[in-house]
Image (tube, helix red, strand yellow):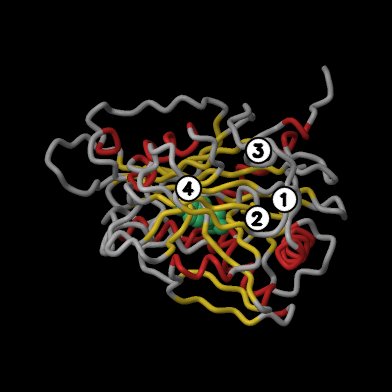
Amino acid sequence: MAATDWSRRSFAYYPTDAIVLSRCIGGVWSTPEVTGDFKLNLHCFAGVFHYAPSCFEGLKAYQGADGRVRLFRPHENAARMAAAARYLDMPTPPAELFVELCIRCVQANWNHIPPYGTEASLYLRPVLFGINPQLGIKSPDDVMLVVMASAIGTYSGAKSLTPGTAVLSRNYDRAATFGSGGYKIGANYAQSLHAYNVAHGKGYRELLFLDSATHTRIEEFGSSNFFAIKDGRYITPDSASILPSITNKSLRRVAEDAGLQVERRPVAVEELETFEEVNACGTAVVITPICRIDDKTSLESGEVTRSWHFGRPDRCSPVSEMLYRRLVRIQKGIDEDPYDWCLIIHPIM
Ligand SMILES: Cc1ncc(COP(=O)(O)O)c(C=O)c1O
């Protein structure tokens, strides 16, 4: 069999060996089941097909420099999924069950973990959704938690830290002020797909959403948080309608320890002209440097009314790169893990 060219892998589904699942029926979670059958047998009246009681997570396992496999901060994902489940009023998986399913999914797909020295990793996708047949609009009583895996490369297929462009979303909102934006629920993504398609169709890598009430403050990108560097400060928006990114949280800690002042506060669009470095951050790529943000009256418009430029279009700016390298070195076991972020996973012998 030809050796895998890990450098050609993007953020996509690549077949693996097994998924791990547990059902909560009548309030009782079943013993986790590992199966090579990726097709779920679901009732067509299951709530997930109609009213979207569904939330998900994303986290990665890395092959380390020392040959050990590390899962990055799974308890943070467990807590975020529990928050989403509570928001949707559906049964909440206990953190230990969530983490156990993740560990077993890595173990069941051990032969798919990309080798150390590549930019690839084993991405885990836990999904929780309502399964009991229903017609009335109500939260589900019974749910299924499935953890699946894909051995992925860098998000866009480009090398890590390759800068991209973004556009402000003036005529589409991601999340309402008092809406669900702070939770990782499928519905948030469904309703931003069209805007994303328009932005991608115009050649932009990222779409930057603004607060839906005033469109004067930066919220976040469609699938990642926003942070900027200015005068030795790490600045990231604070808003209830932004997803609390685990990468952003980790970078803030790393930034603080590197002597940067961290500011988590409302960020006005007007501040863009003062920023030295701008990035998108999230599990998939850790950091995507943003070299240009365009403003337009609408995403569909061909006319750019204003552009902001950050750093060079061909390389990541220095402070952002330093933060990226430090975080990745912890994730891959090159640097010591002073925060106890990595969970070591052992193979099943
Ligand atoms: C809307 C949104 N914001 C931010 C993030 C980044 O979060 P994390 O760093 O936990 O992956 C993601 C990806 O999960 C996302 O979908």
**The N terminus lies in which quarter of the figure?**
top right
Circle 2 crowding by C-alpha within 10 Å: few under 14, some 14–19, many from 20: many
Assign the C terminus to one quadrant of the image. top right
Q: Nearer the viewer, mark 4 or mark 2?
A: 4
The circle drawn on residue 287 is 2
Three-letter residue code for mark 3:
Ala
Residue 237, above or below 93: below
Element class at badge 3: helix
- Would you name the residue on which mark 1 appears? 161
Q: CA distance from mark 2 to mark 1?
A: 7 Å
Whole-angstrom CA distance, mark 4 to mark 2, is: 15 Å
Identify the amino acid type marked 2.
Ile
Amino acid, disc 1: Leu
Q: Can residue 220 be seen from the camera position used here?
A: yes
Alpha carbon distance from label 3 to label 1: 31 Å
Question: Alpha carbon of mark 4 to alpha carbon of mark 3: how far?
Answer: 36 Å
Q: Nearer the viewer, residue 5 or 50?
A: 5
The total of numbered circles placed on residues is 4
Of the residues under marks 2 and 1, which one precedes in the sequence?
1
Q: In the image, which is nearer the foreground, mark 3 or mark 2? A: 2
Q: Secondary structure at mark 4?
A: strand
Point out the residue furthest to the right here: 66
Q: Is residue 196 above or below residue 293?
A: above
Q: Are marks 3 and 1 in contact (CB under 8 Å)?
A: no
